[in-house]
Amino acid sequence: MAADDCLYRFRRQDPRALAEIQRIVAQVVSFQGYRIPAHDREDIVSETLQQLLREVNSPGFAVRESLESLAQTIALRRSLDYLRARRRRRAFEVEFVEEPSGRNGPLAGFASSNAGPEEALLMKERLEVRDRVLQLLSESDRELIRLRVEEDRDCREIAKRQGRSHDAVRRHWCDCMRRVAKIGERILGGPPS
């Protein structure tokens, strides 16, 4: 489609133009490196198309390059926003799923007193999966996780404490998180979300 024709047809919500732009957006969002689950990919594609429609129909809108490149840019931004939010959510979940020192830790009653039965069951399941993953890791991986999560130390502190370089500890942490993801995937029977 010609750029002006594509824009005109997209503004009029022509099914062919919408399908073409949706295909382009889906390609960006479906990039394997992002590891975005299918149901979230559909949401991101939908949100991208809605934002694109709002922008092209706003007064004074002018295409600088092409409608396709604008769609790709918005899809990329939406995907990155999703990944940032997921990272913050995971950090929050790790903080609250941690069961510090034994069963009488500060979270021992969390599942039963503050949450409904579904949340309590999910919490119990997460703790069981966490324990199974930790059992399958090497001693050095478990120690690194203990220092990073339980003692809240950064890679520089750990490197200094263990007499290793900062880069070596950072690489170990990244490799360890990959192993955790792979083990979790095997245990849960699918890619981690």
Image (cartoon, grey):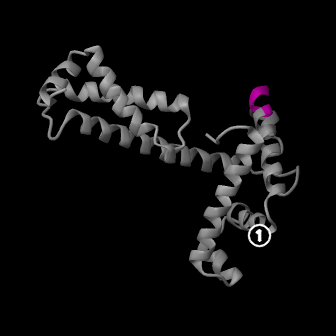
Q: Is residue 178 left or right of residue 189?
A: left
* Image point (78%, 51%), residue name: 133
Q: Looking at this view, is 145 or 15 the one in front?
A: 15
Number of residues whose C-alpha sits closer than 10 Å to that of mark 1, classed few (under 14), some (14–19) or many (20 or more): few
* Image point (37%, 42%), residue name: 76
Q: Quadrant of residue 89?
A: top right
Estimate the x, y position of residue 192 in percent, counting from the top left: 64, 42
The relative height of residue 5 versus residue 15 in the rendered view (above or below) is below
Q: Does 119 lie within the magenta span?
A: yes
Which span is picked out in magenta? 117-121
Q: Looking at this view, is 44 or 89 the one in front?
A: 44
Q: Which residue is mark 1?
A: 140
At label 1, the amino acid type is: Ser
* Image point (34%, 33%), residue name: 24
Q: Is residue 50 left or right of residue 123?
A: left
Estimate the x, y position of residue 66 in percent, counting from the top left: 19, 36
Q: Residue furthest front?
A: 1
